[in-house]
Structure formats: C-alpha cells, structure tokens
Image (tube, rainbow, N blue to C red):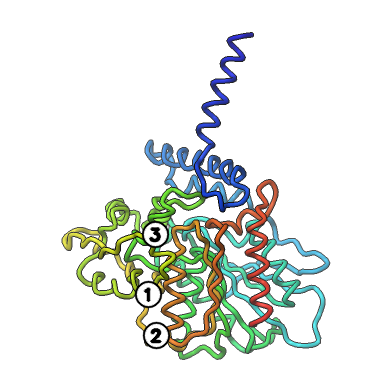
C-alpha cells in the first residue's frame, strides 16, 4: 500500500510539473490554459517522434487536432448549411433559414491553422459561422483551401482567390440574395493572412465586378522578414502558439526544406533583396511605445546568398506576407478591423499593419485584447470554453454588424 501511494505521489508530482507553466497573472483561466497547453505539447512531442522515425510528417500528426473537431453540414431552424464548390474549391455555405425581403450581407471566411491545419468543417468555425449568419442575416462562405505539407504557397492563396473572385460576380451574389455593396472578407491567424492578401490582390483584378466593402483580420500572420519582434520575444514560449511552432508553420507554407526552417528560427533567412524590405516591418517605428518597451531593434541577419533558403519562391511575396506590400498598394484598401492579443507572437504583425494602413489613409479599427492568447476562437466549446474567446467573437460580430 505504501509503495502504491508513493508511486501515485511521484506520478502526481511529475504530472503537475509537466502541466504547470508560469503564465502572466493578467491571463484569465490560467490553469485551464495550462492543461490545454500540456495536451498540445504532448501531441507535438508525438508528432516530432513519428517524423523522426519516418512514420508520418509532423503536420500530418498535428492534423489530428482538426480531424477531432470535424462536424457535418447540418442545417437547423436558423441556418441552412451546404457543402459545395466555388470555382473548383470546396466551401461550406451558411444561409439564414428565414427568407429575407431585402438583400443580405455576406462574409467570406478563411480559417486559421498555419496553412497546415484547420478546416471550415471544425466545430468552432461552425459555431462562428452559424452565429454570424443568424445575427447578421448574412451568407457565410467558409473556404476549405488546400493545406501544407501536401500543398505549398501559392496553392492556399490561389484557392482563396478563386473563391473570392467567383463569389464577387453579380449573378452569383443574386443567387444568394446578397447585396453587392455589403461583402466582407475575414479570417483568423493564417486565415487573416489570406484575407489580407486576397483583399490586396483582388482590387488589381480587372474581371472582378464587385468590390470588397470591409476586411476583418483576427490575430493575423502578416510578415516573413523579422521573427524577432517584441511580441515574438515576449511570447516565445506562450501557449498556444510558441515562436518555434509559428516559424515552422511559415516554413511549411513555402517548402519542406529543413534548411529554410533552421534559417527562419535563427532569423537569418533574409538575403540582400529582403533586407531592402525591412523598412516595411521596422517595429521600432511602427509599434507604439507600450509594445517596444526595452527591446532593441536589429536588422534581421543576412542569410548566405548561396544557400537554398534564399531562393524559395514566395517567401517575401506580398501574397504570402501582406505587410510587405508597398504604401501605394495599401491606399485603395477597404476599411479594416484588426484584432490582436497581448500574449501572441503575432501581436506586432497586426499592430504594424494597422499603423501602415492608417498612414495610407485606410480606416482601421485596432482592437487589442490585453488578457488574450493566440487561437482563442478555437476554444469556445466544451471542455475548454474560454470566456475571452466568446468576448472576442462578440466584438468581431458587433463590428461586422456596425460596418457591413
């Protein structure tokens, strides 16, 4: 009996040591986040092991997070849900079940997941889309774009672009009873990246009949130049998106080349051409003092021009990194909502983009959540159900209601 109790005590101590993570006191429900993070880390360790022994790619194991949350296209009394394709790309469409006498709003939504994970069919996105459709009397088009490691940039962007271009046709909008003057593009994390990129690029498309009215970017990833911004430093080991994982997502978006990942982790992936783009993401100029704090700005280390990571197509393409667009390309963009979280490596990406958009004359609502962490929209269901996730979702829907 004594041995069993001792064994249980040892196991309990080890488990507590594994779960416990010192977190800022301003974060609410910290113990819940510690448990969630411990589960994430366990899956990451399994992914690393299976990749090391050659069984599966790291992201294929991490995809279990997506598969576990999948739900079918179930209609109810409020919303009609249909899986279909637009321009050959899979989408899930949510329409209010009650027929409206007037034209509706529409939101094209792009899910997060680092261009490697995630799905329009996940339960949190299903909940968000249903709420948006019902409360906004809006048609929600949630895009199921292709993912890495099987597909790399620009496949994800091209899928999203194809859907947006298709939907912005007047006859398609009429089919869904959508007002051509009330169409938004929105997304979170990698989806926020794609939303920003497609909003920039679609305005240059001569065949598009209708303009995007507004864009909503929730904790977006926007730049590939500097992975040593204050938020990357401050939140290097923060759940749910530590620096190494975010940089790995970026690397996988472009290539399976491990040398690119190694260079990005060291912030030494830029060549001479990319160094010339550094002014577009110079956080010492673009961030407010409260974010700069005591951090010292340094130009990213120049990579070796002879190595393959400086030659990977797209790494510094604005379609992949929208913050790298020139000022003249930002001036005609629609009004934007940018939502950022204090405890997120991507906080400064969103903040810098807001600054640059404002300087270009674009109306921007920058909503910063002091008590929030990255990916919180994925934790709005049992057993996690973070209150801050519902707060962020409420503000997102309210802004759309006010501006779309």
Mark toward the start of the polypeptide (1 vs 2): 1
Asked if marks 3 and 1 touch (Cβ < 8 Å), the reply is no
Circle 3: element type: helix
The residue shown at (50%, 49%) is 239
Image quadrant in which you'd find residue 390: bottom right
Name the residue beneath numbered marker 3. 250
The residue shown at (64%, 61%) is 125
Q: What is the x, y in percent for residue 377?
A: 61, 59
Q: What is the x, y in percent for residue 80?
A: 76, 69
Tell me, for residue 298, which label it has, or none.
none
- Mark 1 residue crowding within 10 angstroms, few (<14) / some (14–19) / many (20+): many
The residue shown at (60%, 74%) is 108
Q: Quadrant of the N terminus?
A: top right
Image quadrant in which you'd find residue 335: bottom right
Rounded to the nearest whole Å, what is the CA distance between mark 1 and mark 2? 10 Å
Circle 2: element type: helix
Q: Quadrant of the C terminus?
A: bottom right
Above or below, 362 relative to 36: below
Mark toward the start of the polypeptide (3 vs 1): 3
Above or below, 42 relative to 342: above
The residue shown at (56%, 42%) is 34
Q: What is the x, y in percent for residue 162?
A: 51, 76
Rounded to the nearest whole Å, what is the CA distance between mark 3 and mark 2? 23 Å
Name the residue beneath numbered marker 2. 329
Rounded to the nearest whole Å, what is the CA distance between mark 3 and mark 1? 14 Å
Q: What is the x, y in percent for residue 195?
A: 51, 73
Asked if residue 237 can be seen in this view, the reply is: yes
Mark toward the start of the polypeptide (3 vs 2): 3
Name the residue beneath numbered marker 1. 318
- Foreground pick, 7 / 143: 7
């Amino acid at each position: 009996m004594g041995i069993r109790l001792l064994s249980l005590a040892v196991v309990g101590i080890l488990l507590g040591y594994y779960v416990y993570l010192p977190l800022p006191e301003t974060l609410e429900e910290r113990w819940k986040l510690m448990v969630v993070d411990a589960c994430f880390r366990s899956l990451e360790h399994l992914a690393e092991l299976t990749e090391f022994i050659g069984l599966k790619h790291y992201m294929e194991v991490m995809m279990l997070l997506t598969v576990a949350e999948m739900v079918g296209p179930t209609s109810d009394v409020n919303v009609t849900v249909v899986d279909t394709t637009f321009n050959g790309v899979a989408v899930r469409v949510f329409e209010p079940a009650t027929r409206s006498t007037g034209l509706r709003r529409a939101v094209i939504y792009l899910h997060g997941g680092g261009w490697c994970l995630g799905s329009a069919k996940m339960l949190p996105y299903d909940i968000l889309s249903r709420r948006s459709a019902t409360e906004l009397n809006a048609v929600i088009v949630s895009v199921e774009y292709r993912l890495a490691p099987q597909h790399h940039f620009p496949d994800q962007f091209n899928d999203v672009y194809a859907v947006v271009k298709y939907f912005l046709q007047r006859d398609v909008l009429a089919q869904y009873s959508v007002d051509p003057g009330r169409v938004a593009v929105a997304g979170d994390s990698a989806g926020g990246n794609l939303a920003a990129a497609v909003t920039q690029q679609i305005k240059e498309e001569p065949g598009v009949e209708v303009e995007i009215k507004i864009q909503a970017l929730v904790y977006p990833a926007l730049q590939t130049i500097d992975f040593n911004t204050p938020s990357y430093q401050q939140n290097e080991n923060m759940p749910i998106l530590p620096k190494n994982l975010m940089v790995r997502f970026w690397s996988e978006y472009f290539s399976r080349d491990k040398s690119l990942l190694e260079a990005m982790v060291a912030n030494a992936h830029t060549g001479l051409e990319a160094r010339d783009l550094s002014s577009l993401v110079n956080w010492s100029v673009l961030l407010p003092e409260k974010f700069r704090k005591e951090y010292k700005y340094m130009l990213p280390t120049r990579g070796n021009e002879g190595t393959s990571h400086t030659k990977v197509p797209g790494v510094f393409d604005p379609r992949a990194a929208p913050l790298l667009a020139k000022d003249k390309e930002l001036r005609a963009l629609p009004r934007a909502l940018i939502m950022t979280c204090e405890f997120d490596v991507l906080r400064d990406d969103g903040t810098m983009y807001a600054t640059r958009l404002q300087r270009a004359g674009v109306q921007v609502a920058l909503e910063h959540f002091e008590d929030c962490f990255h990916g919180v929209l994925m934790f709005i269901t049992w057993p996690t159900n973070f209150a801050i996730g519902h707060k962020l979702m409420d503000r997102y829907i309210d802004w759309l209601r006010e501006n779309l």
